[in-house]
Amino acid sequence: SARVKTTTVFARIMPEQKLAIVRAMKANGEIVAMTGDGVNDAPSLKAANIGVAMGGRGTDVAREASSIVLLDDDFGSIVKAIRLGRRIYDNLRKAMGFILAVHVPIAGLALLPLLFGLPILFGPIHIAFLEMVIDPVCSLVFEAENEEDDIMKRPPRDPEAALFSRPLIAWSLVQGFLAFVLVTGIFLLGLRWEMPEDEIRALTFFSLVLTIVGLIFVNRTFSESLLIALLRPNRSLVVVVAVVAAALGGTLLWPLASGLFQFGPLHLDDLAVTLASGIAVLVCLELLKHFWRERLKA
């Protein structure tokens, strides 16, 4: 175990020595990848965390013992596979974090009126609309998100590490709680100003949707600033945001939709408040992200 820490190259070694090297590196806490193509490589391919066999000239035994088979026998494909795997893993975590974060204010605003005898905000049609926003975001936007610039600079993750880790859960709850506080504040201000109930419902719903849009942008990156993430192209995000904006406009301008959603008219100052809620979520979470970046990347 001590020798492998200081040695760079082992030459002319036997199969059992390859196996010993792999086991020694794993004992030192390393994440070990082993490449090979022959029968004599099979034991160490099996023992490594990731065994990589040659698909063209490799033996059947080597391929069976491996986790990955290179069909083109090109070692450059390993780097591409690692990059793609890390991107998929990152995007899964981003989508899961977003799902948890976005349901905190939805659940809170659904329960708040029931607990304190306030006007009911959301009915089935409102929840259905929100889910029609959330589902495409998870299945289209985060799936299409490109990898972050530092993704290949990160050390290998622990194979035993949870996909939905405690830091990610905590960060998602922070996001959701902040969104809940902001939208609830707008709801209570509407009550204080004695606005009509249908206008309060429209104001609160629009604020919630725009904070959800803000959460989309926040969860696009774990390590980079918001400005860098905004410069990274994502066509699916543009399409989803455009569709959401058009749908929200329809709920106000189309009388049938306004009746179904039980929305009252919103004035320019009301729309400014809803836009400010989304911007406030972005700014606050961007400032807080500085304290979470290293834990989120782990």
Image (cartoon, rainbow, N blue to C red):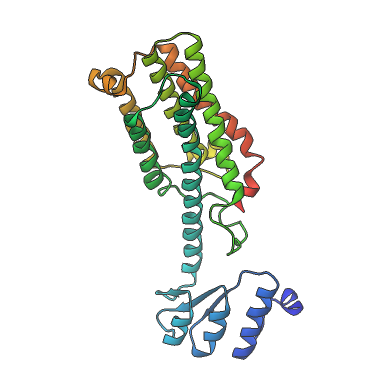
Q: Identify the residue at horizontal 40%, vertical 81% (top origin).
A: 56
Q: Identify the residue at horizontal 59%, vertical 89% (top origin).
A: 15
Between residue 71 and residue 86, name the one nearer to us: 86
Q: Identify the residue at horizontal 43%, vertical 46% (top origin).
A: 142
Q: Position of residue 5 (x, y in %)?
A: 73, 74
Is 71 above or below relative to 38? above
As drawn, the residue found furthest toward the top would be: 194
Between residue 54 and residue 161, name the one nearer to us: 161
Is 57 above or below relative to 185? below
As drawn, the residue found furthest toward the left would be: 256
| Left or right of residue 263, residue 270 in this image | right
Q: Position of residue 267 (x, y in %)?
A: 39, 11
Q: Identify the residue at horizontal 41%, vertical 12% (top origin).
A: 268
Between residue 282 and residue 224, name the one nearer to us: 282
Instruction: Tell me if residue 13 can be seen.
Output: no
Q: Position of residue 244 (x, y in %)?
A: 35, 31
Between residue 209 and residue 188, name the one nearer to us: 188
Is 234 above or below relative to 89? above
Q: Position of residue 183 (x, y in %)?
A: 50, 24
